[in-house]
Image (cartoon, grey):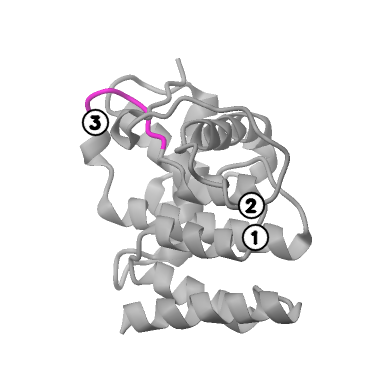
Amino acid sequence: MQQQTLFDIAQTIKNSKSKGEKILTPNLQKMLKVLASMGMDRKVFACLLEIAEVDVQLVKYLAGPIITGGREWRDAIPTWVWQAIAIDRLDTILEEVDKGETGKLATPSEVLAVMMPITFEVPLSWEWNNVYLWASHTTLIKHKPFPNYDYENLWKIIGTTPIDYKQIQHDYETLASDIRTRVIKNVSSEWGKRLKQKPHKKVNTLKEINAQLSLF
């Protein structure tokens, strides 16, 4: 069923291109998001976006590795976080396509994946602890991975007052920008070659399991 759906999406994109119509229509975007929520590999969506001739930087961001922090605790990141990252990247990219812009920040779920392993190794400073809590809260509220959980009182359950984005904006955006830059830098150089664009500088590739980032 999924294979047939993907074929239909790919054919719809090709037909829209040949007719000069808008490609990523609201209905098509909705279909992509549904498939992402079902756990489909984000690289499949990157292929579809490449067919649609979406900006190469967005394609690379979607297809790139998931960056993690720490050395020993990568496997401690819950499965739902990995799926959240795939969904969030696609959501972010579709929003940027609609706005006609290319953003610089990774998603809160990606910040969470970087920071979680680090928390098992060393204590975080007050500033970084707030970044971690904000990213965790934002990701949990959006994806609600645990059934029958009291998400409305999540800050109270965490045991802290709500953290406003302005409190952590500088540190968060510094880290989120660094993550997204690393994702694009470490993606396979094969992505984006189908698109007509100016030649871009080749980058070295890393295996996804080795893509790590430290705050220290």
Under circle 3, the secondary element is loop
Q: Quadrant of the N terminus?
A: bottom left
Q: Amino acid at mark 2?
A: Leu
User: Which residue is the site of mark 1?
Assistant: 53
- Give left or right: position of 121 versus 14: left
Quadrant of the rendered image containing residue 173 = top right
Residue at left 64%, top 52%? Answer: 195
Image height check: is 29 above or below 123? below
Query: x and y percent of residue 121 in the render?
Result: 28, 22
Q: Nearer the viewer, residue 192 or 154?
A: 192
**How far apart are the alpha carbons under marks 1 and 2?**
6 Å
Q: Amino acid at mark 3?
A: Trp
Query: x and y percent of residue 126 in the render?
Result: 50, 25
Is 71 part of what is drawn in magenta? yes
Residue at left 61%, top 50%? Answer: 58
Q: Earlier in the sequence, mark 2 or mark 3?
A: 3
The answer to whether one can see residue 56 in this image is yes
**How far apart are the alpha carbons under marks 3 and 1?**
37 Å
Q: Nearer the viewer, residue 151 or 41?
A: 41
Image height check: is 108 above or below 38? above
Cβ–Cβ below 8 Å for labels 3 and 1? no
Magenta stretch?
67-72
Local packing at callout 3 (Cα closer than 10 Å; few below 14, some 14-19, many 20+) is some
User: Which disc number belongs to residue 195?
Assistant: 2
Image height check: is 21 above or below 145? below
Count of marks overlaid on the render: 3
